Image (cartoon, helix red, strand yellow):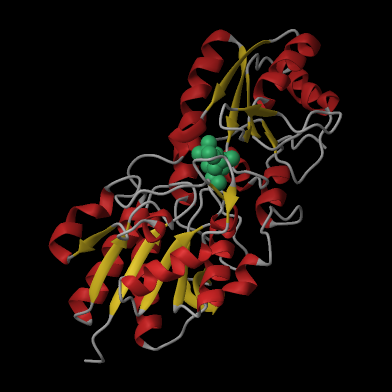
Amino acid sequence: MGEQKKIGILTSGGDCAGLNAVIRAVTQRAVGTYNWEVLGICRATNGLMHRPPQVITLAPDNVDALLTKGGTVLGTTNKGNPFAFPMPDGTLRDRSDDIIEGYHQLGLDALIGIGGDGSLAILRKIALQGNLNFVAIPKTIDNDVGVTERSIGFDTAVNIATEALDRLHFTAASHDRVMILEVMGRDAGHIAISAGIAGGADVILIPEIPYTLENVCRKIKERQERGQHFSVVIVSEAVCTEAGEVVTNSDRFGGCRLGGIGQYLADRISASSGAETRVTVLGHIQRGGIPSPLDRLLASAFGVAAVDLIAAGQYDQIVTWQNRQVVNVPIESAISKYQAVDANSTLVKTARGLGICLGD
Ligand code: F6P
């Protein structure tokens, strides 16, 4: 048994299925194998800014039921960059030193951060600034973190989007409609291409492949001419209008979210093909719910490996999934490479091979 340690764990960025399974795995490994103390930090770095720092003591008994629980019991946020943190008086303040101080106040020996590329870049910057021992675990339904083939939450989101397509097929066929499913994924089309193939979509539109409405409508008309008076389309939220404009919604917090391309397509497809169209925006359903078995496996493997990195004194590392194994690499290499869908990838070739229209 090595030296006694106290480690912190936090979840950061948008939630997804499988975060609690990581918290469970980290706790079981750290407490069960190494007999360390594990503190769960509340609401991402906000818990370390708070005085006293807001934490939950994690023990194998209280994480037992977390394997299948959606969301994150620690809470999270995808707002409020600590380097320009919105203060109650309306000003922006650099709170990075408060986070570093929170880490020391808790007497932490190391910190595990579970996040996507944006939040991991912020956490790494803070760790370098404060010389903190930091290990990262990738999560995001968008699956856009570089180097790792998979991030926690992606598989569950694909399962949910696929099930939505399965359901839409029945109602599309019953009413001779074109059903359009708009899915998340930020700037990458991973959810759409995977669910589109798995769910038998007729058209898949992703931001990485430019499309024309003419090509999309041609596919729908071809199907109509063959007696298939319905079609199912899946579109990534970041797909632009034909004129190249990103479609967004703004909110009262000043945020700007992707969304609305489904309705844009529906209006034009209806006008051009004469088909009745309906739009389903899947939204946050993709982030919620029980993690798939694959996400539970990934979460468990990543959690154990992250703790083992700390035991080995290896920091500034991220655990990744490559060729059926967990491989650790410098965090920098994962966050410096944005992983969009490769237009020459097997999945894109598969979609084309199946006769699915990609709009180009
Ligand atoms: O990054 C995850 C994600 O779900 C994106 O796919 C989506 O664009 C965004 O977060 C939605 O963010 P919010 O939860 O702030 O609406």
Q: Quadrant of residue 116?
A: bottom right
User: Residue 311: where, in percent of width, then height?
Assistant: 34, 85
139 left or right of 69?
right
Of all residues, the one furthest to the bottom in this rendering is: 2
Closer to us: 276 or 58 = 58
User: Residue 210: where, in percent of width, then height?
Assistant: 82, 39
Is residue 198 at least partly visible in the picture? Answer: no
Q: Quadrant of residue 104?
A: bottom left
User: Ligand 1 is in which quadrant of the figure?
Assistant: top right
User: Residue 285: where, in percent of width, then height?
Assistant: 44, 33
- Quick check: 175 above or below 8? above
260 left or right of 273?
left
Of all residues, the one furthest to the left in this rendering is: 61
> What is the quadrant of the C terminus in the image?
top right
Closer to us: 317 or 163 = 317
> What is the quadrant of the N terminus in the image?
bottom left
304 left or right of 133?
left
Q: Residue at x 61, y 55 (%)?
A: 144
User: Residue 61: where, in percent of width, then height?
Assistant: 13, 62
Of all residues, the one furthest to the front in this rendering is: 89
- Quick check: 300 above or below 69? below
Is residue 187 at least partly visible in the picture? Answer: yes
